[in-house]
Amino acid sequence: MKNLCLLGSTGSIGRQTLDIVHRHGGFKITSLAANSNIDLLEQQIDAIHPKKVCVYDKEKAGILANRLKNNSTEVLSGMEGLLEIAGDSSNDLTVTAIVGMIGINPTLAAIEAGCDVALANKETLVTAGHIIMKAVKEHKVKLLPIDSEHSAIFQCLQGKYGPTGDYAAWNGSPIVEKILLTCSGGPFRGLSYEELRNKTAADALKHPNWSMGNKITIDSATLVNKALEVMEAKWLFMTDVDKIQVVIQPKSIIHSAVQFVDGSIVAQIGVPDMRLPIQYALYYPERLPLDCGRVDLFDLAKIEFYKPDYDTFKGLKLGIEAAKTCGSICTVFNAANEYAVGRFLKGEIGFTDIYDIIEHCMAMHKNIAEPTLEEVLGAEAEAIENAKM
Ligand code: NDP
Ligand code: MG
């Protein structure tokens, strides 16, 4: 039985993680964390009986602690609470399914405690990839991708790399020619920039294939998500950004592919269901059964591919520019986007304003090539300030 810490248990990835663990067992869930949804967290505590939970919101943590007076589960709060549960060296695996840059420090705490990490929280690699990968190497832990494209790439690379989880021996693989990072194109594929302008949050939340949390669903509509995934892939697989090609594949059946130096392309195909990559990360290197539906090649009949429209979906272009530049500019890209998406979801700004805010913040920033954690957080604060333009 392995000890598992689940950060973000009340979210989309968190709930699906619990579902998978419930099906296959093998883990004792010792701690959970959420931001403020104490009603769902309380139900999870009743079902799982973790040793500790963290509610980031201090007031909500107090309410929950009061409700759980006669319960053996300890309630912690704030960043101290997150660091305490993530940094517990008796954990074998920590799933980081928190949304946003708030995930950096808890992820680092888990790695430093010698714990393997199954990572959904892409913002952590986007903004602090150089720090995280160094820590992973130093503490000899596994960093297992949950993001479906990165899981697909990871699955395509099995047997091509050294020991378990030892991606590319940290120097990129000499046999990988290209990573083909697939992208559905989102609900607005094919529209012009003018048509994008008036799209509302309700329109953007209708993703054609995937059911996900709100923030990432908007990022999928703007294609900012794909730019974040280019940055994520660059760190996870130690690959030059030039070797990562974004390919639009509207049905989300090919979750990504790797092209090797002999021209051979290995792709991972499956129905769009996040439980598959979550399960693969949790039980790696085992492959367990999953009742997630099957791709019927005859039903599918054909697979279409398109080049992304970088001029219309400007967020993708800006993000790839940031990824190539590398450094604190990636934090600025991410933070400006986080801020803008928050306002877009509240109906305060238009869809293409998200791009304008990102562009403005990037233009205002003086890049730091290898920022310290403090500088990463400084770049975030600066971007949020500039985003209020
Ligand atoms: P959701 O919005 O559905 O869930 C976010 C979770 O994080 C919730 O449990 C939330 O708690 C918790 N949380 C937020 N802030 C804090 C905090 N400060 N302290 C503790 N917990 C916090 O997001 P998703 O599950 O969709 O996404 C999670 C991460 O996974 C994101 O980084 C996303 O980019 C990535 N990802 C998601 C995919 C998906 O299919 N959903 C696919 C690939 C990657 P509360 O409920 O209380 O607010
Ligand atoms: Mg993805």
Image (tube, grey):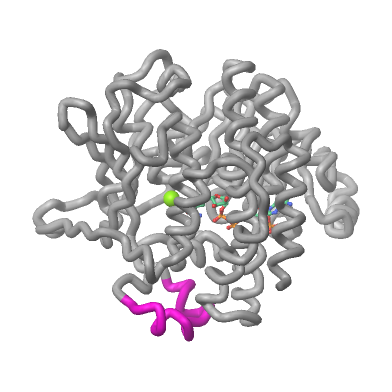
Residue 202 part of the magenta segment: yes
Location of residue 159 (image quadrant): top left
Most extreme residue toward the top, as rendered?
Answer: 163
Asked if residue 274 lies left or right of residue 254, the reply is right
Q: Is residue 68 above or below residue 213?
A: above
Residue beneath the point at 55% across and 65% down? 214
On the rendered structure, is 254 left or right of 166?
left
- The residue drawn where x is 47% and y is 44% is 324
Q: Does the magenta stretch include residue 311?
A: no
Residue 239 position within the rendered picture, expressed as x and y whole percent measured from the top left: 41, 32
In the depicted structure, whether residue 387 falls above or below residue 84: below
Q: Is residue 23 left or right of residue 73?
A: left
Specify the quadrant that holds the C terminus: bottom right
Q: Residue at x 38, y 52 (%)?
A: 273
Residue 89, visible in the rendered structure: yes
Magenta segment boundaries in residue numbering: 191-206
Q: Which of 294 and 182 is in front in this view?
A: 182
Number of on-image labels: 0
The structure residue drawn at horizontal position 53% and vertical position 29%, both measured from the top left corner, is 143
Q: Where is residue 353 in the image (x, y as percent from the top left)?
A: 56, 75
Q: Position of residue 190 (x, y in %)?
A: 29, 73
| Of 169 and 374, the residue lying toward us | 374
Quarter of the image where the N terminus is located = top right
